Image (cartoon, rainbow, N blue to C red):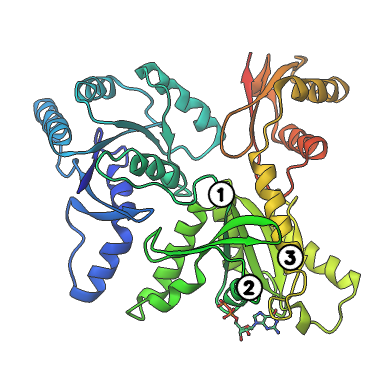
């Protein structure tokens, strides 16, 4: 089977990634047979493809010499055994000489090497990561240890490149939607409502992502894949696994999806677990739609009541509030067509690329009219902007003094982008960079 080796200097975060890849299976084994987690290889899977992971860093470093020897051992092991090599570095320490040495050795093999930059939690660190281009790579992956994001993109690529499997995402290029939410909010009812009566469901493929059911829908003139998290809970064998399973499932489904529908029970309101799901979707830069379900149970369906509900949620979710909120009933099917339509709009907006000429034509006059406040008598001039070719919208604004651009002005810029180009439900990243 395919073997993925994780190589890198000590303390860059290899074992964190390793544990994350193994977590679910290990936990299951643990609870059934009391197996300890103290090992350096294990089985994992992604998108239905099984593979073995080796953490090459399971040793202690003493002297410089041992360090040398150990790294050579790691590399030799990786080069010999592995199908793919994840070369991990750490943005905190930047590019150090040992990184270059390891990378140089790895490059002599013909194995695919994935440069993975760990601990990239902030925009600042995202920019700092560009330093690793000095290694001569065309691209790299960044992981956030704080949010755990980035693993999905990395694994998508690693698995896609496996030489011996003929794996291909049967749904490649189609919108992937997850309905997430606390137990009993109505996720299954919604899924069934979409399945119901009409005969136009196309495919139902189990196990595309292990233990999940993905259904290709062709409904209301839209083709999309519903990644089913609801079905998962029933598969948990051991009671203690239930919570763990559903959290893990939600994470994986969110990573695999383009749009996350967060479903809330109208009779209960927005709670901390909803906040967690929201945070997860936002950190993974996925499109977001909020559905207030069981609207049929609400007696007092006034506009005021709806506005109240909306405001309460928007108060809680913080700054990114440009999110569609719909009041639906999965049971009576009220507005579920609308919910699908809105999710598809969010999907399209997330993919949207604004032409550079158009972006500059629209944004530069706005910056002229409302420039960033001067700092210590120095004027900040924004000269040029581009949208990066990323799966979700990210914009870079080139200016003379990026260090003086304050958070408030970034928010202003984001709001202008939303106003001019319409990214409702889509997280946007904004960078100010030296021209
Ligand atoms: P899940 O755990 O999120 O999948 O929730 P289910 O779909 O199993 O729904 C939990 C319960 O809520 C079931 O008894 C459903 O019949 C009920 N339910 C779901 N959606 C609605 C709705 O829109 N209105 C009403 N009145 N009940 C609903």
Q: CA distance from mark 3 to mark 1?
A: 18 Å
Q: Does 399 appear above or below 115?
A: above
- CB of mark 2 near ligand 1 (< 8 Å): yes
In this rendering, which labeled residue sits more in front, label 2 or label 1? 1
Residue 6 vs residue 225: left or right?
left
Label 1's element?
loop
Query: How far across and how far down the image is residue 101, in percent?
Result: 23, 20
Q: Quadrant of the C terminus?
A: top right
Find out whether the residues at labels 3 and 2 contact each other: C-beta distance under 8 Å. Answer: no
Whether residue 358 sits left or right of residue 152 in the image: it is right
Judging depth in this view, the residue of 336 and 242 nearest the camera is 336
State the residue at coordinates (35%, 19%): 135
Q: Position of residue 414 (x, y in %)?
A: 73, 37
**Who is closer to the viewer here, 375 or 433?**
433
Residue 298 image point, x, y percent: 79, 82
Tell me the number on the disc at residue 358.
none
Of residues 241 and 261, the one drawn nearer to the viewer in this rendering: 261
Q: Separation of disc 2 and disc 1 at Cα?
A: 20 Å
How would you rate the neighbour count of disc 3 (Cα within 10 Å): few for under 14, some for 14-19, many for 20 or more? some
Q: Earlier in the sequence, mark 2 or mark 1?
A: 1
Which numbered mark, 3 or 2, is in the foreground of this view?
3
Check disc 3 and report the residue beneath it. Answer: 337
Q: Measuring from the top left, give residue 180's x and y in whole percent.
A: 57, 65
CA separation in Å, label 3 and label 2 = 11 Å
Figure quadrant, ligand 1: bottom right
Residue of label 2 = 190
- Tell which circle, 3 or 2, labels the residue nearer the N-terminal end: 2
Q: Splitting the image into 4 quarters, where does residue 299 fall?
A: bottom right
Q: Which residue is mark 1?
A: 174
């Amino acid at each position: 089977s395919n073997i993925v080796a994780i190589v890198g200097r000590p303390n860059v975060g290899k074992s964190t990634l390793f544990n994350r890849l193994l977590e679910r299976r290990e936990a299951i084994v643990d609870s059934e047979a009391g197996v300890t987690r103290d090992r350096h290889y294990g089985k994992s899977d992604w998108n239905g493809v099984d593979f073995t992971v080796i953490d090459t860093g399971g040793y202690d470093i003493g002297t410089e010499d041992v360090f040398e020897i150990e790294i050579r051992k790691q590399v030799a092991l990786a080069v010999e055994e592995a199908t793919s090599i994840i070369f991990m570095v750490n943005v905190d320490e930047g590019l150090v000489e040992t990184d270059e040495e390891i990378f140089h050795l790895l490059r002599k093999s013909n194995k695919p090497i994935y440069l993975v930059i760990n601990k990239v939690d902030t925009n600042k660190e995202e920019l700092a990561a560009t330093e690793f281009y000095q290694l001569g790579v065309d691209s790299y992956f960044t992981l956030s240890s704080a949010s755990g994001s980035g693993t999905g993109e990395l694994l998508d690529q690693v698995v896609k490149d496996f030489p011996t499997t003929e794996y291909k995402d049967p749904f490649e290029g189609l919108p992937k939607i997850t309905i997430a939410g606390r137990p009993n909010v109505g996720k299954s009812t919604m899924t069934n409502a979409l399945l119901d009566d009409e005969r136009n469901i196309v495919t139902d493929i189990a196990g595309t992502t292990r233990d999940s059911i993905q259904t290709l829908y062709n409904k209301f003139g839209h083709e999309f894949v519903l990644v089913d998290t609801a079905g998962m809970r029933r598969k948990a064998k051991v009671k203690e696994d239930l919570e763990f399973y559903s959290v893990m499932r939600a994470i994986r489904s969110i990573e695999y999806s383009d749009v996350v529908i967060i479903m809330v029970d109208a009779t209960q309101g927005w709670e901390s677990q909803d906040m967690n799901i929201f945070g997860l979707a936002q950190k993974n830069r996925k499109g977001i739609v909020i559905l207030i379900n069981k609207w049929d149970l609400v007696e007092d369906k006034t506009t005021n009541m709806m506005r109240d509900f909306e405001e309460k949620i928007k108060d809680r979710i913080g700054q990114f509030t440009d999110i569609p909120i719909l009041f639906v009933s999965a049971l009576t099917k009220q507005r579920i067509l609308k919910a699908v339509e809105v999710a598809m709009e969010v999907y399209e907006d997330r993919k949207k690329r604004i032409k550079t000429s158009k972006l500059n034509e629209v944004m530069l006059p706005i910056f002229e009219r409302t420039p960033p406040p001067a700092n210590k008598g120095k004027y900040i001039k924004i000269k040029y902007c581009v949208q990066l070719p990323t799966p979700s919208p990210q914009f870079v604004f080139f200016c003379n003094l990026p260090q003086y651009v304050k958070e408030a002005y970034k928010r202003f810029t984001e709001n202008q982008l939303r106003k001019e180009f319409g990214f409702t439900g889509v997280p946007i990243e904004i960078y100010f960079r030296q021209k």
